[in-house]
Image (spheres, rainbow, N blue to C red):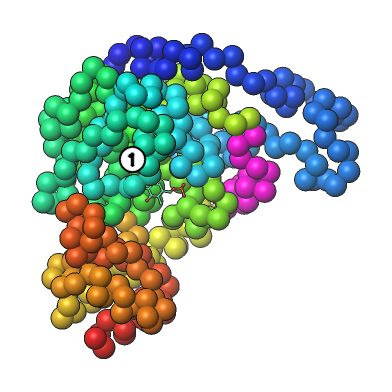
Amino acid sequence: MKPLQQLTRPNIWSLAPYSSARSEYSGRIANVFLDANENPYNAPYNRYPDPLQHEVKAILSNIKGVPEECIFLGNGSDEAIDLVYRCFCEPGKDNVVAICPTYGMYEVCADINNVEYRNVMLDERYQIDADRLLAACDDNTKVIWLCSPNNPTGNNLDREEVVKVVTQFQGLVVVDEAYIDFSNETSIARQLYKYPNLIVLQTMSKAWGSAAIRLGMAFASKEIIDLYNKVKYPYNINELTQKQALQRLSDTHAVEQWVKILLLERDRMMLAFSELRICQQVYPSDANFFLAKVDDAQQTYDYLVDRGIIVRNRTRVKLCQNCLRITIGTKDENNELLGALRSI
Ligand SMILES: *Cc1c(COP(=O)(O)O)cnc(C)c1O
């Protein structure tokens, strides 16, 4: 890996961050807070939240096996994705390399930040080839984007190839693990200490059932997390979100049950799809959704919309022609989808 300073935008490296009232006061016992121009009335909503979300990170540290100082919390993974560009990629000069197809936000954020985005196609099994990714890089490539299990394809990327990319690339590698709780693969976040150039993204939006509260996580070296913390909005995670996250994270049993049910339903749905007349192929999945190739994705999509059932039409995505992406719902929801498709 190149030195982190060389990978960081010079203005960010030398940035003097905003120092909030709550971060200047560092934690001894106090009960009179006249430092932040807050209103003393309307508790508990009158106070600014903890800017570094200490309590939430302490629980996450336990669950994920990652030290607290190696955790960043964002307003969804979206914030953690955008910060990669804002911290490391000089607009109009640097570039990033990504697998294709994958999650659309990496490219949207590149466009917003005026950073060149280079696609490297997955193979016909939707797998990566480390050498082809590395060959797409040049001196100005700051980041390689990986997503495992990948969206919209649903499969884990080969761990050996992922490790090869991480160990051979001189810049930063992001591995988005939004769906890791549905996968048999262990999180690569457990190996963070070995890889100083690795950033792992996870989220509360999927297995944890909390898309509404907007809480995404980045796990990386303390040096990278310190940069993130310098650039983020001072109070980026609001108090309601922090409270709800604490509650959700304190009941891991519920999440395990949800995952178990969803995986059983996924396997049932994939089998049922493979027997549909209109279905040409069901792709393997390590997530809470699967990709199915049908005769005419647009036609099937429109037919389902007419019946009030919305799936994701991915037919215009590269390597996904005539593919629908099906999220696993409740048993009743899944049966409604199957019933509609069986009566085509
Ligand atoms: C759903 C999803 C996310 C989640 O984004 P949030 O902003 O945390 O809700 C991140 N990455 C991928 C690949 C996803 O599919």
Magenta residues, start to end? 235-249
Quarter holding the N terminus? top left
Residue 138 in sight from this viewpoint: yes
| SS under mark 1 | helix
In the image, residue 244 lies in the stretch drawn in magenta: yes
Marks counted in the figure total: 1
The answer to which of 102 and 184 lies nearer the viewer is 102
Horizontal and vertical percent for residue 291? 24, 62
Vertical side of 344 occupied by 45: above or below: above
Tell me which residue sits at (56%, 36%) in the image: 57
Horizontal and vertical percent for residue 91? 38, 24
Q: Magenta region's main secondary structure?
A: helix
Tell me which residue sits at (55%, 55%) in the image: 212
Quarter holding the C terminus? bottom left
Horizontal and vertical percent for residue 276? 19, 79
Tell me which residue sits at (53%, 37%) in the image: 73
Vertical side of 221 occupied by 303: above or below: below
Would you say 251 lies left or right of 301 here?
right
Would you say 290 lies left or right of 48 here?
left
Vertical side of 230 occupied by 273: above or below: below
Horizontal and vertical percent for residue 79? 49, 38
User: Based on the displayed image, in which of its 4 quarters is residue 95 positioned?
Assistant: top left
User: Based on the displayed image, in which of its 4 quarters is residue 297 positioned?
Assistant: bottom left
Question: Mark 1 highlights which residue?
Answer: 107
Would you say 73 lies left or right of 55 here?
left
Vertical side of 142 occupied by 254: above or below: below
In the image, residue 179 lies in the stretch drawn in magenta: no
| Kind of residue sitting beneath label 1 | Glu
